[in-house]
Amino acid sequence: MKINKLLRMLLASLVLLLGLGAAGAWADEGDPSGRVARLSVAEGKVSFQPSGEQDWSEPVINRPLTTGDRLYADQGARAELEVGPFVVRLGQATDVTIANLNDQIMQLGLSQGALEVTVYDMPAGNSVEIDTPNGALIIQQPGSYRVDTAADGNSSEVVVNNGALQISAGDLSQTVQSGQAVQLSGTGPVTATLVSMPARDEFDAWYEGRDRQVQSSPSVRAVGRDVPGCDDLDRAGRWEDSPEYGRVWYPSVAPDWVPYRFGHWAFIEPWGWTWVEDEPWGYAPFHYGRWAHIGPLWAWVPGPIMARAVYAPALVAFVGGPRFGIGIGFGVQAWFPLGPREPFVPWYHYGPTYVRRVNVNVTNINVTNINVTNINYVNRQRAVTAVSGDVFRGGQPVARGLVRVNPEQIQRAEVIAHPGVNPTPRSVLGPRVVTPPPVRTVRFNPTPAGRAAAAATFQRPLAPQTPGTVPRNNTMTVRPPVNSPRAGGTEPQVMRVPTQNPQETYRPNSTPYEPRDMVRPGGAPPNTPPRNVFTRTAPSPTNAPFSARQDAYSSHPGRPLEPQQMNNVRSGRPAGPSQDKETLPHAPRSSPPPREQSKPAPSEGKRH
């Protein structure tokens, strides 16, 4: 009997692994990305612009960022994004757009400022690309890379602290190795000059300290580097071994603390309703793993270390329905944290591979028929949180607007697919809209016609050579970068540098788009010309503006747009009906809020 049970468990695990491995690109058509960028640091004045929007807002720590989102760190400010095995750090006066972020690529557009990227691991099939006004930089190995682009966009300095990257500018293809620095000058023609390594500055000291913190983190070793935010757990709790769940983490919190109660809901396409926790450590335990009540304490159960952890917007189950209670079920939104081995049912578009990956610890999940009525949710009676629809849809702090729900109402409630309320501008933009920073509109230029035009004006600094050969005249002058974005260097000298020119191919995006989809709006005066950023990989289209897609949500309240609906709205067509069939019931529709035309009201200030 025990042997048969063991065989069934092994077979289920084998089926899961085969399903994961058979997914070549790790995603079905239209699946959401398994990776997002966590905003882990925002020191000083940092501004955030969601994908497709004109307005800028004050970002909140732990906010997930994805393709099309944009950050600006003002004078004296710094910011950090954690993206699985990658970390992106912004120095002052730095403007960065996430041009692409999915399971295979992280592509960043650096319009101006200082950017440092640490690659702890480069999984097979992954690429990291930094696009500047002076060429594209393709990181080839784990390491530390710094790029400084001048405010006028006419020059960029590329420093490889360790690792290797390839510079691609028109028909130029040059590899830069550890301990080398190159200055790119001009936007057409472009010249590349090998310069001496610049002197370390305050920004270098800061990001090197951040790297040391991650490298020595016990929590990172316990969970794996692919889960963002783990190093913050070191200072906020303790790890212990549980006989039932393995390694678990206990947060240092008040006795009345409950998971998914101290934060707010944001609406982020393509996932829709997304939880943003208040505590600085509150990222990894709310987008990965499950929560268990062990004795009198809450414990986060991360599960086994995964090579590719999959992000979820909130690992909760929503409850409601007509039996939830008079005056409660129709105007109140309620949820509770999922416990170990309880399946997560996404409320957004997904395929079978994605739902298996996001439920990797639930080996018996049936993606076509998830019967939640047979699940004994362990956290249902002790951890339901409820708020009014206005608090939920408005992105307001949940803990300040709690609604009391008695045990009888909880017992009558059904597990439902998702809340039946639609987002407002505040839930999309964030709690506080700010004055746009002084940055230009960014125009990415990866199309074949644009690349051909750029290649015609670029100047190759070195003649093409057979890889591995170095002719006598193959030299570059090494000089202090006196005109570079940051000063430093030593006396001029001459260095012999091998040149490589591998064949470069254009890889079109799978989704058709027009040039306007590659334009990221900025805050400069209307007549200011856009800043062209040259790329090797075509960026993904941005979202349609919230104002254009707001009416489309009314046909299916509480659900984000499906891929074909977003494409329709982006192209100026009606969104069309939903095509996905949901396995869970819906809550009764509450009265829709009045359409908001104004910007969100300013909040009391930034929360950390």
Image (spheres, rainbow, N blue to C red):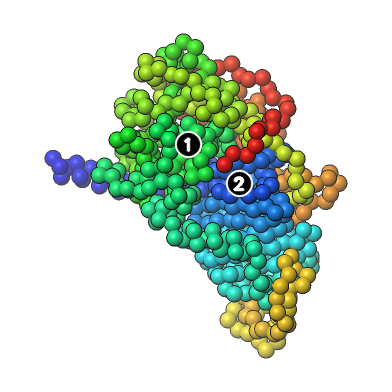
Residue with the most extreme left position: 1
* Three-letter code for the amino acid on which mark 1 is drawn: Ala
From the top left corner, tell me how far across and down residue 59 is, in percent: 63, 42
Which quadrant is the C terminus positioned in? top right
Can residue 185 be seen?
Answer: yes
Q: Where residue 88 is drawn, which disc sits there? A: none
Tag of residue 314: 1
Expressed as whole percent of the image width and height from the top left, the position of residue 424 reads 63, 28
Query: How many callouts does the rendering have?
Result: 2
What secondary structure is marked by label 2? loop
Q: Which residue is drawn at 73% across and 60% down?
A: 133
> In the drawing, does residue 21 fall left or right of residue 421?
left
Three-letter code, disc 2: Thr
Q: Position of residue 472 (x, y in %)?
A: 67, 89
Disc 2 crowd rating (10 Å Cα; few below 14, some 14-19, many 20+) is many
74 relative to 359, above or below: below
